[in-house]
Image: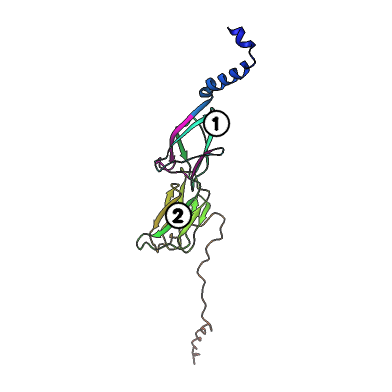
Amino acid sequence: MLRTFLRTPWWPIVLVAFVLIAGGPLNSVDARGVIVADANGLPLAPRDVFFGARHYKVGEDGVYFIPNLPRGAKFSVIAQGYNRADVPAGTTEVRLVTAIITLNVADSATGQPVKNPEARVGSRVVGRGTDSGIMVIAPAPPKTETILVCASGYASGTMQTGLPTAGIRLAASTDEDSGCPELPGASPRPSAPVITPNPAPASPAATPTSSPR
């Protein structure tokens, strides 16, 4: 029977079809998992999940299902404020790392914007804000590093990299060490000038002494 089959002109077509049908499930994989923010481990909805020209919708729960990916393939995840992730198909949890932080700095007592805040990591300035109290920190430092937030007339506060949108409140202060600490190599703060009255006061006249008679 096999010899008879091999003598037929269409046996190569049947063989190719058999290989495609039988080998398909062995050469593909379904990707299943959840997308979370690395900062807090909570699910998030990405802006796009795609493989080549194929795009997949993911809900607020961050759960994704991508069928029939080539074995060993990677799909991509993009979310606002996070670094892009290229993910192996077998991954079950995708952790997106914060790429940029938009920080709202406000007065702890009044809730009003703190003007011209500054963000530092060690001796590096990583962000400067405006009169609106809004400050962009980019790129976001690793979440293990402490960010110092300071402004003139306020006690400094600290935070760590979290979600792309965050807020911090600073307490107003009149202490000498309020405001932003001096950076290494910065010019020292000028000392208070010595003011000399103009015109200068006249020197007191010498008291005459009487000569002995």
Measured along the vertical axis of the image, is residue 146 above or below residue 134? Answer: above
Q: Residue 155 occupies which quadrant of the picture? A: bottom left
Measured along the vertical axis of the image, is residue 197 above or below residue 123? Answer: below
Nearer-the-camera pick, 204 or 14: 14
- Magenta region: which residues? 30-51
Nearer-the-camera pick, 210 or 17: 17
Residue at point 54%, 33% (across, down):
74
Helix, strand or loop for disc 2: strand
Q: How many numbered callouts?
A: 2
Residue at point 37%, 61% (across, down):
111
Whether residue 22 is in magenta: the answer is: no
Measured along the vertical axis of the image, is residue 188 above or below residue 32? Answer: below
Which residue matches tag 1? 73
Density class for disc 2 (Cα within 10 Å; few <14, some 14-19, many ≥20) is many
Whether residue 49 is in magenta: the answer is: yes
In the rendered structure, find residue 103 and report the number of the disc placed on it. Answer: 2
Give percent across and percent down for residue 201.
51, 83
Q: Is residue 114 left or right of residue 84?
A: left
In the rendered structure, find residue 33 and report the number of the disc placed on it. Answer: none
Give percent across and percent down for residue 97.
48, 42
Residue at point 44%, 41% (across, down):
58
Nearer-the-camera pick, 86 or 164: 86
| Residue 180 seen | no
